[in-house]
Image (tube, rainbow, N blue to C red):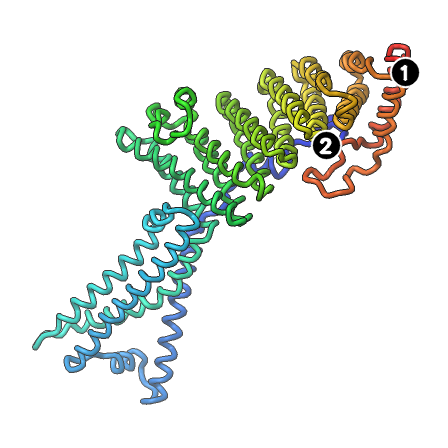
Amino acid sequence: MSRLKKTKYSKSTFEVLTAEEQAEMRTRPRLVEKTSFRAKLNEWFMPTSLLLGFTLAFYLLQVTLSVGWSNPFALLSRSLGVTLENMDNATSFFVEASAAILGIVITVVAIVLQLAAQRYGARLVDLFLADSINRIYFFYMVSALLYAIMTAFSPKEGFFPQYAIETLLFGTLVEIALLAPYFLYMFRFLTPTNLLSAIQESNQEAMKKACAATNQTELRKLQLESGRTIEQVTDTALSATSQMDRNLGLMAINQIREIGMDYLEMKNKLPEEWFAIGPEMFIGISSEFYKEICEKKLWFEAKAFMDMELIYKSSIRTMPDAVSAIAYNIRVLGLEAMKIKDDDLLDLVVQFLNTFIRISLNEKNVRAIFNLFYQYRLLAEEIFIYNPEMSQKILFYFKYYGETCLQQGLFFVMYTAAYDMETMVAAAFDREATNIKELLLIFLGLEDNVDRKKDVFAFTGIRKAQLILATYFYSKGDRELIQLILNDLKSETVEQLTAWRDGLLAVQSRKFWEVTDRGVNLEYIDLEQKKQLKLFYNEFILAHADQFKSS
């Protein structure tokens, strides 16, 4: 267990991965569990047997009531037997029934498939045709029709194929009985959950084939298939966001993550030629960026992130949940990048998180930035030990985007950035980051470009966040880091510092009085930290009032 878990930062907004998220990262269960063979057997065998059994029992009951009790097999042979005289009527019925069944199924499938393809994309047709159940049932229907036609022409004078006719009767009954479970299967297949699962499984199969591929032409085909898999799920998500279908949109976004995780599990097994993708998959990017993602073996990940960017732009105004889902899934992929030690992928994750913030900034969407900062911060807290240099860059990015938003009048973004940066520095301290001083200095420079008179709300939030961090260091006994903060606070008067302290002490409720995405009041500190805040003021501020700016 890390030191962070033992000395958890008492400020309520200091959060790490929940136990559920940690379990998900370890086991990564499928979004859709595969149906077992036994379950599939029950789905087909039980309904078919029930329909045939009920029909046969009811028929025997009616015949028995008409002609009296007899041996069931003898009764069936007598009542259902076909002679040469009535052969034409019987066989023509079988041909017509088989043709009608085939026509009905094709008609229903064509209509339903066309409607579903308009929502989920044209690749749905390929998935439907590639499905083994669909192929088997259509093969059975066509074979039954051909068999019925052949049987109809078989009887001749002196030649009567009794067993063939009985087989045709049984086969036709089974064909009709299978209609119910087949239509049930077809409609289930076309549900969003199963469809997205089928797309994921299709991509998994393509990856496995690519790992063993030796032919360049085959590998090229598999590359395009994998790229189109991402596009298919993206099209589904875009369609869902345009139609305000929240559940389908979130499901598709999560599926992109799962496809990405599948890919990362197999990435090291792929041949070197796999990573040289044709430019037709990336028409809208510069040649420099295209060359970079190929050289760093990131074309698949870049494709997934760029498609997430399309979804992000489409949903930022209409579906806030999709924004949060994209931010969360990008973070999960970033954590996986650290797990497999793929620094280039982690750098790409950070670049796209910055891109999403820029998109939100251009839209002046404070809520989107608020949610992005939260996921970005959680990712940064995991990076402190893994890559100290990158953690400094991320802290700078928070400062940069906070200042940029402040210039556009988005005061709350700078306010949020202050508390997130404070939480990140505290997390870095708990995890014994080697660059804790550098991180702290970046945080202490947050107010340098803030107009304290014009941007009162943001400036006050920054100073309060710095005081909370100083209190935390005080509770941990680190006087050296406290001194750095005190040096930065010397431009403030004791009266102003006291007013900020009193403001922090006055916050009694951990939760804000309105429902927010994070659900907490950023200025809240618990009772123990409030005691530490008072002690810190008495020892370092009130006792050295002459070192601070005069009133």
- Residue 1 appears in the rendering: no
Circle 1 residue: 551
Q: Position of residue 550 (x, y in %)?
A: 89, 13
Quadrant where the C terminus sits is top right
Q: Is residue 538 left or right of residue 300?
A: right
Judged from the image, the secondary structure of the residue bearing numbered disc 2 is loop
Residue 483, which numbered label?
none
Residue 103 lies in what quarter of the image?
Answer: bottom left
Task: Work out whether residue 76 or residue 395 is closer to the camera in this orientation and state it.
Answer: 395
Task: Tell me the quadrant of the picture where the N terminus can be found.
Answer: top right
Given residues 418 and 166, the one toward you in this image is 418
Which of label 1 and label 2 is nearer to you?
1
Of callouts 1 and 2, the N-terminal one: 2
Q: What residue type is labelled 2?
A: Thr
Image: 521 above or below 48: above
Q: Quadrant of residue 459?
A: top right
- At x 36%, y 59%, the residue is 111
